[in-house]
Image (spheres, grey):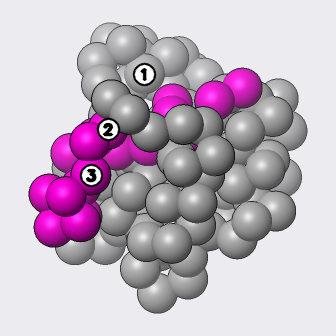
């Protein structure tokens, strides 16, 4: 299993995906084809945290008047299933690895996974 979850309207996602040979990967656009409960469960197994998968930059936070500091793991799970923009992206997932988001450390690990030098 090799999957990438991304948002096609996100320039950062497109730039990151363009760096890698994704032949043989399932590439999922999450607005058109949202993450399922089973897929979220797969991600949780590797991250041990729904909060780690949650984008605290989602515009939905302000629109819904959410206080992220008060949310529980169950709240994060339900929000992730409710709206695609809550997923930190992109997410690269394999049988034994997961790479979540676009922070520098994650991108360095992803490049190493693909055998690229910085």
Residue 101 % position (x, y): 39, 37
User: Which badge, 1 or 3, is on the more N-terminal residue?
Assistant: 3
| 72 versus 63 height, above or below | above
Q: Is residue 41 left or right of residue 66?
A: right
Instruction: Reply yes or no: does residue 93 show up in magenta.
Output: no
Residue 35: image quadrant is bottom right
Residue 58: image quadrant is bottom left
Which residue has dot 3 on it? 66
Q: Is residue 74 left or right of residue 59?
A: right
Q: Secondary structure at mark 3?
A: loop
**Camera-side residue: 114 or 88?**
88
Q: Secondary structure at mark 1?
A: helix
Q: Is residue 116 in sight in this rendering? A: no
Instruction: Reply yes or no: does residue 61 show up in magenta.
Output: yes
Which residue has dot 2 on it? 68
**Camera-side residue: 53 or 29?**
53
Q: Nearer the viewer, mark 2 or mark 1?
A: 2
Residue 3: image quadrant is bottom right
| 49 versus 28 height, above or below | above
Q: Residues within 10 Å of mark 3 (few under 14, many from 20)?
A: few
Q: Residues within 10 Å of mark 2 (few under 14, many from 20)?
A: some
Residues tagged 3 and 2 counted as in contact (Cβ below 8 A) = yes
Q: Residue furthest front?
A: 70
Which span is picked out in magenta? Answer: 48-68
Residue 17 % position (x, y): 39, 52
Name the residue at 72% across, 26% down: 48
Give residue 106's mark: 1
Residues tagged 1 and 3 counted as in contact (Cβ below 8 A) = no
């Amino acid at each position: 299993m090799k999957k990438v979850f991304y948002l096609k309207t996100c320039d950062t996602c497109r730039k990151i995906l363009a760096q890698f040979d994704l032949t043989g990967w399932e590439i999922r656009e999450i607005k058109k084809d949202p993450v399922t409960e089973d897929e979220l469960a797969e991600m949780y197994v590797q991250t041990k945290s729904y909060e780690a998968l949650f984008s605290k930059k989602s515009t939905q936070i302000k629109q819904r008047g959410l206080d992220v500091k008060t949310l529980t793991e169950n709240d994060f799970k339900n929000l992730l299933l409710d709206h695609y923009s809550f997923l930190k992206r992109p997410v690269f997932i394999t049988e034994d690895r997961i790479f979540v988001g676009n922070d520098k450390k994650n991108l360095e690990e992803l490049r190493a996974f693909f055998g690229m030098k910085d």
